[in-house]
Image: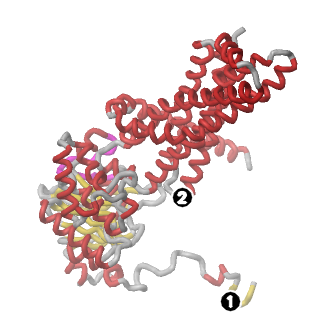
Amino acid sequence: MNPTDLVAALGARSINVLGSLGHAAAFSAALVRHIAPAFRRFQLTVGQIHAIGNYSLVIIITSGAAVGGVLALQSYYSLARYGAADSVGLLVALALLRELGPVLSALLYAGRAGTSLTAELGLMKAGEQLTAMEMMAVDPMGRVLAPRFVAGVIAMPILGAVFSMSGVCSAYVVAVKLIGLDAAQFWSTMQDGVDVFEDVGNGILKTIVFGIATTFIALYVGYECKPTPEGVARATTSTVVVSSLAVLILDFLLTAVMFGRP
Amino acid sequence: MQRSEPCTLAPDNLVQIDHVTFGYDRSRAILSDVSLQFPRGRVIAVMGSSGGGKTTLLRLIGGLIAPSSGAILFDGERVDPTDAGKLFALRRRLGMLFQFGALFTDLTVFENVAFPLREHTNLPESMIHDIVLMKLNAVGLRGAAARGIAEVSGGMGRRIALARAIALDPELIMYDEPFAGLDPISMAVIANLIRRLNDATGATSIVVSHDVSECFAICDYAYLISGGHVIARGTPNDLLTSENPEVHQFIHGEIDGPVPFHYPAPPIARDLGLMNGVSQ
């Protein structure tokens, strides 16, 4: 490739990237404009909270329980060496509330609800349902996308809380019922060491940010996908990949801001 | 039978397409300087081969896409896709039947027909119920109101979409390939409904199709589009008796004629590695 072609290719690529960014920004602005109307027709949002939240509960509770149980087992074997086995409850609670609850529930949400949103929108596009709506003078942004976005942002913190709660309960069963640690110690160390604002509050804040990011990505990718079977398949894959990366990068940034100070 | 003649603004035209050119990219125009008129109260067919720009024409009228040049007038007002407010006001006055129905698969038959009424009116639920059942009765599917969309056939789906398209009693109803993929009975039912509903409601209908016999049975006037141009216009009888070879080939479904069987390609001998009968 000669230098002129290289510059032309770079230029074309840059224009494409900038165009995509501009498009995403315009999409976000339109979505934000329709959030308030989505609250006025809240029954649409309630239906989506049911579809996004309730149908994700099984995977969230099961995964939370598995993670909590494993954390309790692993932390017990390490802490017992130093005579600190009583702190298992505290360690599990902090790990779940600060990091694992928000991050893992967001990753599961992206895989379960995010792909469902993307595929649903892609198929609606392929079946000309969104165009039909436009031709009926109904803006799909207000009727379809905004209620799903609001529902996702509401459902995500609740799912994160359910994940952490399930994990703590599972850790209790493993640590107290199976290993035989003292129940009072398990709960009291947790009560002493967990700060409502610092740990629970920041954890909830993380799930809200993850909810905004993953739901936005799922909706944008679905709305912009090619209306073909291949296009929908690619879009659902993109949702999982981009959402997962976004969650992990955002988690690092949020953790640095929330807990990084000395 | 003339090519894209200039049109004049006539008050009895509900829709007027004036010297419109459109292409998805600059290199290839789907429509080149076409002018068509759609008088009020008539059923007008727009026919032509697949990929000829017929559906694009409907999308232009609905403001889903903007023409590269020229103007589209609806009831004397220019259709402007950049003015969302005016565009949505215009769309409330038209109904469109999509090629495959475009029904909302998460809603029942009843809810699909009720959709535009719920979105655009504040009618009480009892009145919406009655209007929806009347619309479904008009297309013969009142009994299927409670069914899911997955439970109805293609022909029934098309009729439900028609009931939804006329839910708000639009002034203009656009039909995109309403006969495609239907059995003869469903085809006859749809054709009969298009004519009957048009006459009963006083609406204007634009039927985009390549089904010559069904279109000619119900339309008052027809346009034939080919290669991005209007190659013929007139009553069904005018087109049936046309001596234009391209029109004749399309109307009578002849294999050979001005529209070639083969897509443009180099000589087959070159593609097969044979030149002058000798293997290369």
Magenta-drawn segment? B67-82
Inspect this view and state whether residue B164 appears. Answer: yes
The chain to which mark 1 is attached is B
A165 displayed left or right of B117: right
Q: Provide the residue designation for mark 2.
A: A229
* B250 shown above or below A131: below
Under tag 2, what secondary structure?
A: helix
Q: Which quadrant would residue B229 be assigned to in this image?
A: bottom left
Q: Provide the residue designation for mark 1.
A: B276
Residue type at numbered disc 2: Pro
Residue B198 rendering spot, x and y as whole percentages: 16, 64
Judging depth in this view, the residue of B108 and A8 nearest the camera is B108
Inspect this view and state whether residue B32 appears. Answer: no
| Residue extending furthest toward the right | A81
A138 displayed left or right of A262: left
Residue at 50% from the left image edge and 37% from the top image edge: A53
Q: Is residue B70 magenta?
A: yes
Query: Are there few (<14), some (14-19), or many (20+) residues within 10 Å of tag 2?
Result: few
